[in-house]
Amino acid sequence: MKLKYNLIALSFFGGLLVACNPMEDIYNEIDSEGITITKTEEEYVLVKADYESIAKAAEADAQTDEEKSLAKRVASDLALNSFASADKYVPAILANLYGSWGKGSTVGVTYNYQEDVSETLKKYSVVSAYTLNGDDYKTIWENNFLSPSHAPNVEIPKILAARMEGAKEGDFCLADYMYDLNDPVEGIDYLNENFNSCTAKQPIEIAEWTQVCVKGTEKWSANVYKGDGSAELSAYKAAGEVENYLITKPVKIESADALLTFDIVFGHYNGDAFSVLISDKYNAGGAFDVSAWTDITDYFAYPTPMESGYTDKTNVGTYSLKSYNGKNIYIAFGYRGAKDGVTTTIQLDNVKVTTSQPSQSKPYNTLFQFTSGKWGAYIGNDVVVVTPADYDAMGDPGKNDNFSSSIKATDYLPVFLAQKLPYAKEGDTQVVLYKYYDGKTTVAMADEYLLDTTWKLNNNIVRHEKETFLHNGEKWLFDPTITVSMTVDDYLYLVKWVAENKPAYLDKDYPDTGEWWFGASSHYKNFNIQMYKRTGNDPEGLVDKEDEQKAEAYLMKQIQVACGLVLSHNYPDAPTQMNGVDLYYKMQAVVYDGTSYSYEFRYKSLGGGQFEIAGDPVKL
């Protein structure tokens, strides 16, 4: 059997194919002259690139969110489905692969197909994802988090009502937000700088704050995103070494409860660049001597570094200023790096000297649904939502609180479900909702898992083997030949037909399960053509007792008629064509002559439940 996966593979093995098939020289010559030819490829197996091409085409055709979701799944699941079906999208693949093949050419295409999923999974086929931002929190209060006094179930529906215009009944949205288990306690802020007043991409300029460039000229500059500012510095574009200190204004400490705290982000981390210094002796405007400052860098907890991308904004905790009570202090935030050395990006925000405990907010998510004209937290129990804490517990997924093509959900969710549902029983299913980064955006996705001995992805993917596509002279079309097999009910239908039309041919010993007009038996699930059985049960003398060859031909003809009756009974509304191509059925049955053999009988649909024999029986 010749397998053809793509044109590159065919070209690579060209010399070998010529050696194996002399006709290939002729085909190549015809191809080069642009002449249409008729050829047959026994099997072409769709590859990843094919599924990706089909996904793009299907997404362009999609009219609804559900259709778009099905289109995208073709690429992620490497399987076609009810929307992105083979008859609609495989012809374009074949046209690209076999451009010179013409009328009468056929290709047997093998591909994966995702059958219809459960109603529960369909329910979550389209879920929007929304992350609360600085502007959203500002509509609530001055903090960039929610808390018991500003509960997610109360505040987030208001935000979604403004942000998710056009929501329809039953729509879902997975909302991500920051939440503190405790309400903030009011205290005294001796210093509170969020850099929101600074001009984007310009050096930080705040009254009484100073910057000291010990090496290089790079300065802390304002990074402003959606109105939320921070002080940022990196040596990535520096000319050489960088050593800079951003120094606060003097702060008078008047409480033994005073604390220093701030938020920080590390970006594209390749080494330590950040430091925190404190002094109660610094003379603003005077000489800067690092050795005269106290280094308190290691008293804080920092986010886990990432070689690519940025960490979440993280509060570093607090440093007690009790020993400085009654004194004026300065805080210096240092950066040391070099263009050819450490270039880590540092983003500094929310610098506070306060008697208040800083927020211990952490990321959370909640599933909301739009019902009766408003958003509300979903209270159903038919889905498990993976939370930020769950991603963190898994390890790598916690870096961005999502899965991706490199961090696969199937590598983590089976263990997650085993821990989440310890009392689940074999055969149970569970829908899981999670975040997935597709290379461009982060979206909400749902999968269904089935508990066998372990939890496994229940993707309903089956393999369709060598479905025939043919060229009609203008384009490639799916050849709608439907293959079915005789069942117990089909054999029993024939027995009942004989009871009504040829009762003399019912099996005398087993009239409820066997007959000899066709030789069908629902008990044995076959057609019996043993000559001594048939000649001994032939009241009309239709079987030729003298010529066994003629007798066998007659009996096989009877089986063809029988299978046609079954098709008429089972498919009364079968059309004559599908996709502009004549519709054929192949009926497979077991024939017994002392040994069991499988045969295939082919029929052409004439419409209205009528079928015409097309060709001789084929032994399989």
Image (spheres, rainbow, N blue to C red):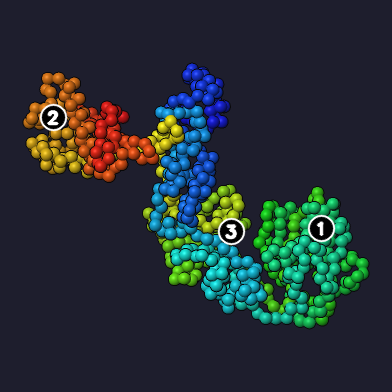
CB of mark 3 within 8 Å of CB of mark 2? no
| Rendering quarter of residue 170 | bottom left
Residue 179 in picture, x, y percent from top left: 59, 70
Please determine whether, in this image, residue 541 is positioned above or below residue 184: above
According to the picture, the residue beneath numbered tag 3 turns out to be: 401
Identify the residue shown where x is 51% and y is 22%. 30
Q: Residues within 10 Å of mark 3 (few under 14, many from 20)?
A: many
Q: How far separated are the C-alphas under marks 3 and 2?
A: 72 Å
Q: Residue at x 25, y 31 (%)?
A: 613
Q: Quadrant of residue 471?
A: top left
Q: Quadrant of the C terminus?
A: top left
- The tag on residue 311 is none
Disc 1 marks which amino acid? Arg
| Mark 1: secondary structure | strand
Q: Does residue 13 appear to the left or right of 287 in the view shown?
A: left
Nearest the eye: 433 or 581: 581
Residue at 74% of width from left, 78% of height from top?
A: 189
Q: Residue furthest front?
A: 474
- Is 540 situated above or below 90? above
For label 1, the residue is 336
Q: Residues within 10 Å of mark 1 (few under 14, many from 20)?
A: many
Q: Report, in whole angstroms, how far the alpha carbon at label 3 lies from the one at label 1.
A: 30 Å
Q: In the rendered image, which residue does mark 2 sit on?
A: 533
**Looking at the image, is 254 positioned above or below residue 511?**
below
Q: Residue furthest right?
A: 286
Name the residue at 49% across, 31% down.
98
Q: Amino acid at mark 3?
A: Asp
Residue 518 in sight here: yes
Does label 3 or label 1 sit earlier along the sequence? 1
Q: Is residue 129 left or right of residue 84?
A: right
Alpha carbon separation for disc pair 1 and 2: 98 Å
SS at badge 2: helix
